[in-house]
Amino acid sequence: MCVGKCTRILGPCLIALGVLSIAANVLLLFPSWTWSYVKEGHITKQAMQVPGVWGGGIIVLLAATQITAVGWRCGRSSDCGTCRNMFLSIVLSGLALLGSTACFILSGVGLTNGPLCLYNQTEVLQWDYPFVNMENPAFHTRAQNYLYDPSLWNSVCIEPPNVVAWNIYLFSVLLVISVVEMVLASLQVINGFFGCLCGLCEGK
């Protein structure tokens, strides 16, 4: 595929993924569509770090906007500083790769550790991460990982309602988005190198 056409495809795809990443992370801050838990500070640590906003979102959107602009502008004019712009796209795509990787790691940690929630700890209600230690007395069953035991999702955490499923679904979405972003950013780095060496090959 021509370098120019590839650029015009990768840019909009990254824009869409960046917007979805921000939306998914924002939703993590409002379990059960309630803002009071954010106000009280009862939100999972990895969600509060908003990796989907800065890592998979803003950084990726900066790269995607520049990539898209270069693809369309240079597609219409041969005098657009192709090598300079493609080199900049390589740098920004590298940053997008780092940002999406950070989002992937933090989302994976959030998914593995489970949500911060109010649960019954030896007849005392407390806010903590009950799924970090699966030998916790709050459990009536033993499982290697809460992800494989859906019966625990609504039986352990009292508040926020349905927070376990909420975190699982949204962190999973962030994982998938960040993986796709990493692939597309890597492709644009390679595409950028070819663009610097060979130009956009428009009309060839």
Image (spheres, grey):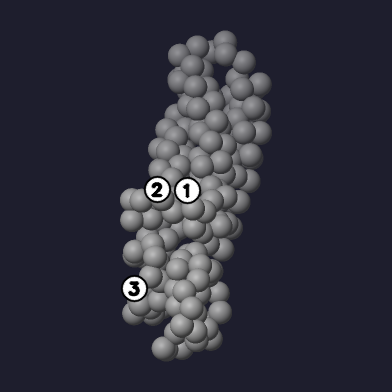
Q: Residues within 10 Å of mark 2 (few under 14, many from 20)?
A: few
Q: Residue at x 66, y 21 (%)?
A: 84
Q: CA distance from mark 2 to mark 3?
A: 20 Å
Q: Which residue corresponds to mark 1?
A: 39
The part of the image, by quadrant, that contains residue 97 is top right
Relative image position of residue 4 (x, y in whole percent): 49, 27
Q: Is 8 drawn above or below residue 60 in the view shown?
A: above
The one of 165 and 183 positioned closer to us in this rendering: 165
Residue 97 in the figure: left or right of residue 130: right
Q: Which residue corresponds to mark 3?
A: 154
Q: Is 32 drawn above or below residue 142 in the view shown?
A: above
Q: Which residue corresponds to mark 2?
A: 35
Q: CA distance from mark 3 to mark 1?
A: 23 Å
Considering every residue shown, the one lying at the far bottom of the view is: 141
Dot 3 or dot 1, earlier in sequence: 1
Q: CA distance from mark 1 to mark 2?
A: 7 Å
Q: Can residue 65 be spotted in the picture?
A: yes
Query: Is the Cβ of the residue at disc 1 closer than 8 Å to that at disc 2?
Result: yes
Query: Is the Cβ of the residue at disc 2 closer than 8 Å to that at disc 3?
Result: no
Relative image position of residue 172 (x, y in whole percent): 43, 59
Amino acid type assigned to the residue bearing label 2 in the image = Trp
Amino acid type assigned to the residue bearing label 3 in the image = Asn
Relative image position of residue 125 (x, y in whole percent): 47, 74
